[in-house]
């Protein structure tokens, strides 16, 4: 009885993984280097304008590296899959595989396993390293390069801001709507004794002025009583603009999945719309799997290559498909943040559409 033909498949799998991994290391390193150089020259005016030292600029870029690695990993997986398989096709090795009975599915299996492991590693990386390093890069930009005094105490659920009228406690800063929600302004004396608090339901920035709603002031009298007074909207937030608050806005990249989930629950309990955060929450799970989806798209595209196929043509077609993926993802994010699509559809729509396309390409190749 013939033995199961397992060893040749194992050899082929190791060979395919080795070809992919060697290409992946080169493309990932190259993409990271290009990204850092472009980012550096793009911010060169910012560094020079604030008299930043080389050490401060280097620290800022170094703390951004984990986020940069996350952003360039999916295109690196796409390029590596296309190039490694295109090189195999150029050397007629794919034709030899087919002639020996090795189907495209068997060629794809080890590559998809590696892409899935990269996606899982990216998810773990995003939950542990990226939030801490991204927040540290923002601290370097604001405190060391721009030499601003620490004006905020940030938590996972709210923001404390030291403004012109006192200390502002803000439940939610909505970048898309240019609105602050749930503001409490604490005014204190020179000896840090509480004088009054002003509660504001919301404040919308129209580009020039604040439109404040629901402002009520509570003053402490010398006898310890509390007096409640209505407040003129024009007397609140006179010196701050939305740009001041956006400087201390904690982006979703600075929060892990758990931290962002806790923030959403806290805002929901206070009756604040957190739909845009729900899109970001689902994206934290969907985006890491871009690597797996793009690999699934790249394999049948490169697998179509015939004898002496053009590597440039294969990479060009794959790059076009990858660009289309990012267009679909960006459109879904925009519609999700605008409330047109449910958060799950906005975050996972690109993955679902491109997975179906990949399955269709696999069937057409075979």
Image (cartoon, rainbow, N blue to C red):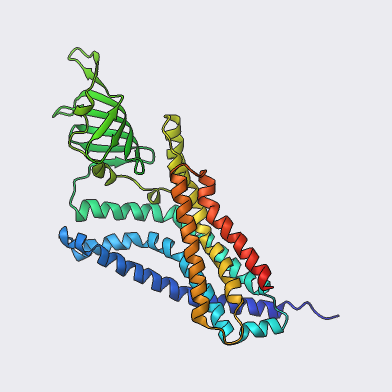
Q: Looking at the image, which residue is at 78% across and 77% down?
A: 4
Comparing 331 with 302, the one in front is 331
Q: Farthest residue in the left direction?
A: 190
**Residue 22 x/y as whole percent:** 50, 77
Residue 204 seen in the current view: yes
Residue 124 seen in the current view: no
Q: Looking at the image, which residue is at 50% across and 61% down?
A: 325
**Residue 311 x/y as whole percent:** 51, 81
Residue 364 shown left or right of residue 164 in the figure? right
Comparing 303 with 25, the one in front is 303
Comparing 359 with 27, the one in front is 359
Task: Judge whether 355 appears above or below 216 on screen.
Answer: below
Give residue 29's quadrant in the image: bottom left
Q: Looking at the image, which residue is at 69% across and 73% down?
A: 366
Task: Judge whether 291 appears above or below 8 on screen.
Answer: above
Q: Looking at the image, which residue is at 54% across and 82% down?
A: 87
**Residue 234 x/y as whole percent:** 20, 28
**Residue 283 x/y as whole percent:** 48, 51
Task: Judge whether 291 appears above or below 189 on screen.
Answer: below
Q: Farthest residue in the right direction?
A: 1
Residue 37 shown left or right of residue 234 in the figure? right
Q: Which quadrant: the N terminus?
A: bottom right
Residue 193 shown left or right of residue 121 in the figure? left
Residue 314 shown left or right of residue 38 in the figure? right
Give residue 106's quadrant in the image: bottom right
Total marks in image: 0
């Amino acid at each position: 009885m013939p033995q199961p033909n397992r060893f040749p498949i194992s050899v082929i799998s190791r060979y395919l993984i080795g070809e992919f991994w060697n290409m992946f290391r080169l493309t990932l390193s190259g993409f990271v280097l290009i990204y850092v150089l472009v980012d550096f020259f793009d911010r060169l005016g910012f560094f020079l304008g604030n008299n930043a030292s080389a050490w401060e600029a280097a620290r800022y870029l170094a703390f951004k590296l984990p986020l940069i690695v996350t952003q360039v990993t999916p295109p690196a997986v796409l390029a590596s899959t296309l190039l490694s398989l295109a090189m195999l096709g150029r050397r007629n090795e794919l034709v030899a595989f087919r002639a020996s009975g090795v189907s495209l599915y068997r060629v794809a299996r080890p590559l998809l396993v590696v892409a899935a492991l990269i996606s899982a590693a990216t998810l773990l990386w995003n939950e542990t390293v990226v939030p801490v390093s991204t927040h540290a890069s923002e601290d370097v930009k604001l405190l060391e390069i721009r030499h601003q005094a620490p004006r905020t105490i940030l938590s996972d659920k709210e923001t404390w801001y030291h403004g012109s009228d006192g200390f502002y406690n803000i439940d939610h800063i909505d970048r898309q709507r240019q609105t602050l929600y749930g503001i409490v302004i604490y005014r204190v004396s020179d000896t840090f004794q509480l004088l009054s608090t002003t509660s504001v339901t919301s404040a919308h920035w129209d580009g020039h002025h604040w439109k404040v709603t629901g402002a009520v002031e509570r003053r402490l009298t010398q006898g310890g009583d509390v007096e409640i007074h209505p407040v003129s909207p024009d007397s609140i937030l006179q010196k701050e603009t939305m740009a001041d608050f956006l400087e201390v806005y904690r982006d979703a990249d600075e929060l892990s999945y758990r931290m962002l989930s806790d923030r959403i629950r806290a805002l929901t309990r206070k009756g604040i719309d957190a739909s845009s955060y729900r899109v970001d929450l689902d994206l934290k799970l969907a985006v890491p799997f871009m690597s797996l989806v793009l690999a699934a798209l790249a394999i049948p595209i490169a697998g179509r290559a015939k004898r002496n196929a053009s590597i440039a043509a294969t990479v060009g077609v794959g790059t076009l498909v990858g660009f289309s993926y990012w267009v679909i993802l960006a459109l879904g994010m925009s519609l999700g943040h605008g409330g047109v699509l449910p958060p799950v559809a906005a975050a996972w729509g690109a993955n679902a559409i491109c997975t179906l396309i990949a399955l269709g390409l696999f069937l057409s190749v075979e």
